[in-house]
Amino acid sequence: MKKSVLTRYRVMAYVTGVLLVLLTLGVIAKYVLDMDGAADFTRVVGIAHGWLYVVYLVFAFDLGSKAKWPVGKQLWVLLAGTIPTAAFFVERRISRELESRVADDAPAVAEA
């Protein structure tokens, strides 16, 4: 597996996670605190999160298929983008697990 597959998953996990936290804060500001401007903020962040979550799904599925994960693990990673802060924890765990595999698959560089 190429390192780029893991890297693009990691980037999208962080982007999705940050947007979901912002969306959660926006919803709290809109419905609990009744703040002005929260509705527009929530709308914009919600749309961005929705579209970028689709990209996250594609990259996470690609990573899972190349890592040959079982279906349960694949679903766990895919759903991490829907639970606030879960994407950060799942990304860290997956990265630790796969970094050694990516390093093992990398060609050895001859030292001069």
Image: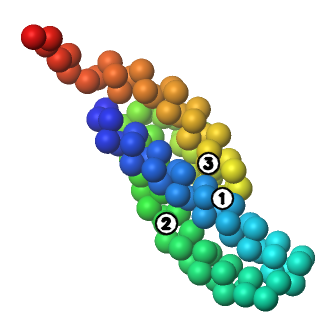
Residue type of the residue flagged with mark 3: Ala
What colouring does the structure picture have?
A: rainbow
Would you say 59 lies left or right of 44 here? left
As measured in the structure, the alpha-carbon distance from the residue carrying label 2 to the one carrying label 3 is: 13 Å
Q: Is residue 78 above or below residue 20?
A: above
Q: Earlier in the sequence, mark 2 or mark 3?
A: 2
Q: Is residue 54 above or below residue 104?
A: below
Percent coordinates x, y for residue 32 in the rendering: 89, 76
The disc at residue 87 is 3
Q: Amino acid at mark 1?
A: Thr
**Would you say the residues marked 1 and 3 are in contact, meaning their CB atoms lie under 8 Å apart?**
no
Residue to which mark 1 is pinned: 82
Dot 2 or dot 1, earlier in sequence:
2
In the image, 20: left or right of 62? right
Image position of 105 with respect to 47: above or below: above
Instruction: Please state, as top left, top right, bottom left or bottom right, where the N terminus lies in the image.
Output: top left
Task: Tell me: 55 left or right of 20.
Answer: left
Inspect this view and state whether residue 65 appears: no
Question: Considering only vertical position in the picture, is 108 above or below 28?
Answer: above
Question: Which residue corresponds to mark 2?
Answer: 52
Going 32% across and 18% down the picture, which residue do you hit? Answer: 104
Q: Residues within 10 Å of mark 3 (few under 14, many from 20)?
A: many
